[in-house]
Amino acid sequence: MAKLFSKKKTSLILTMFLVIFSVLIVFVLSRRNKELNTRTNASNQLSNYIIPKKVYVLIYNPTLQLEGNPTLVEFKNWNNPNELVQQLENWFLVTSEERVRYNIVSIEEIDAIPIKEDGFEYTQASYLECLEDETECHKPDIADYSEIFNNNSICEKFNNGEFDELWMIAGPWFGFYESRLTGPNAFYYNSPPLRGTSCNKLLPIMGFNYERGLENMVHDYGHRLEDTMKKVYGSWDRNSSAHNWNKFALVDSQANSFDFSGCGFCHFPPNAIDDYAYSDTRNVRSYCNQFYNYPNLDNLSDNTDTISCDVWGCNELGYFRWLFRHMPKYQGYGPDKKLNDWWMYLIDPNIVLTNIVPDYCPTITPTPTPTKTATSSPVITGTSTEDSTPTEDPETTITYIPTSTEMVTESPIDKKSDFNKDGKVNIVDFRIFIECYKAETSECDLNRDTKVDLYDFVEFRMDYLQENS
């Protein structure tokens, strides 16, 4: 990303930029006025819980003796898996407005390629041939999850409370699903449930690929959201507004009965006609901003905005941040008897089955889970496997109730763009931002990706607009 400013810029250029910024504020305010008014006038209350989750990470990164002993990541010059872990951890912290707090409790690197479910095992030579020619790759591709669980005592550690979620990171053709569930009454999670383990409650298993970028990792969570909410509501019909998940995911091009959209879903933003069209500039009527009023969703067709990809920056990662930030995040139950906070469902699939509000949590003294700070400029990555056709899973219930350590009342958090700590985000903070931007100091890393770039300016702009609307 080219820098907007250099140390050689004159004060005249800075003054001109301030003028341009002021004009930009007026322009964006005029376009976002309806959205901001919706936020301001909402009668609902934001959820006051943080959701801390401990993550156990397995990295499959074999040493290639045939090539002089580099690791696979080094040999192919792929992304550093340790750094991508922090990228995803920080992305959720920022996108959830500091409510989802993944905490990496253990990272283990394994010098091997997983055995396949049918017993096939790559040699180094056959795997390198696969990378050169996909027709040489073994099919079916799925790894033997049971073998992985047994070799690493996964359920034993999980049942002892050592972690809440498993992330597995590997190269292409290692055979991991994007997301999977195991445990009692596990349901379809963009893949068939992993049966026959000893895990005593639902364990989410994410599969990432260090050949890919952060956008692919977040994409995996987009599919996780789809199957989570399909389970919550019992169905998903793309041409229906019968329940709130249908309303949220509605896309006009995928729904013959509607000429407007909601917020979209993983492969289809609200204005998309084709898969993965995150940069589509087509204008569409969308009521997505009405989800800031959740669960009050009356007269949606009469309360639309005309939008295109510019509202999320016309890129995949921007779309998912926009999508997840519109996801309901409010207190209590709605008229449909579902939680008004869909983040709880997404992050803890056990709550999908119980549908229980942890109402004892507000009385707990806050003990926020610490988060890591990256020590070097990260290289980001992720994965994407072929989508499977969802299969229905019968409605089931279990007796698990979230423990007191899983959700705690959120502590007040300072506005990250209030650099001079006067309680306001204003032009003074913008001048400070410009100075630390030129110096590339960590104070300006507003999205916590360990880089100071244009995306931090976007974060500042959002804080400024919300403060001064």
Image: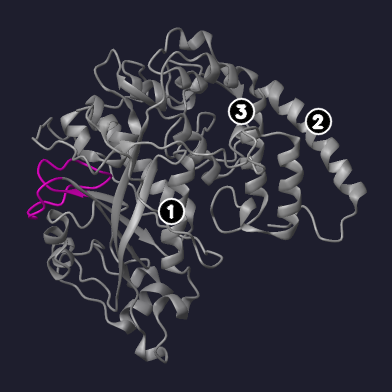
The residue shown at (46%, 65%) is 83
Identified by mark 3, the residue type is Gln
- Disc 3 to disc 1, C-alpha distance: 25 Å
Identified by mark 1, the residue type is Leu
Q: Is residue 226 visible?
A: no
Query: In terms of secondary structure, what is the magenta stretch mainly?
Result: loop
Q: Nearer the viewer, mark 3 or mark 1?
A: 3
Residue at mark 1:
88
Frontmost residue, 401 versus 133: 401
Q: Quadrant of residue 150?
A: bottom left
- Disc 3 to disc 2, C-alpha distance: 16 Å
Assess whether residue 247 is covered by the magenta stretch.
no
Frontmost residue, 358 versus 379: 358
Identified by mark 2, the residue type is Val
Disc 1 element: helix
Q: Nearer the viewer, mark 3 or mark 2?
A: 3
Residue at mark 3:
466
Residue at mark 2:
23
Residue 351 relative to residue 376: left or right:
left
Disc 2 element: helix
The residue shown at (40%, 81%) is 71
The part of the chain drawn in magenta is 181-201
Mark 3 residue crowding within 10 angstroms, few (<14) / some (14–19) / many (20+): some
Residue 382 on image: x %, y %: 43, 58
Q: Which badge, 2 or 1, is on the more N-terminal residue?
A: 2
- Disc 2 to disc 1, C-alpha distance: 34 Å
The residue shown at (42%, 13%) is 297
Q: How many marks?
A: 3
Q: Quadrant of residue 47?
A: top left
Mark 2 residue crowding within 10 angstroms, few (<14) / some (14–19) / many (20+): few
Q: Quadrant of the C terminus?
A: top right
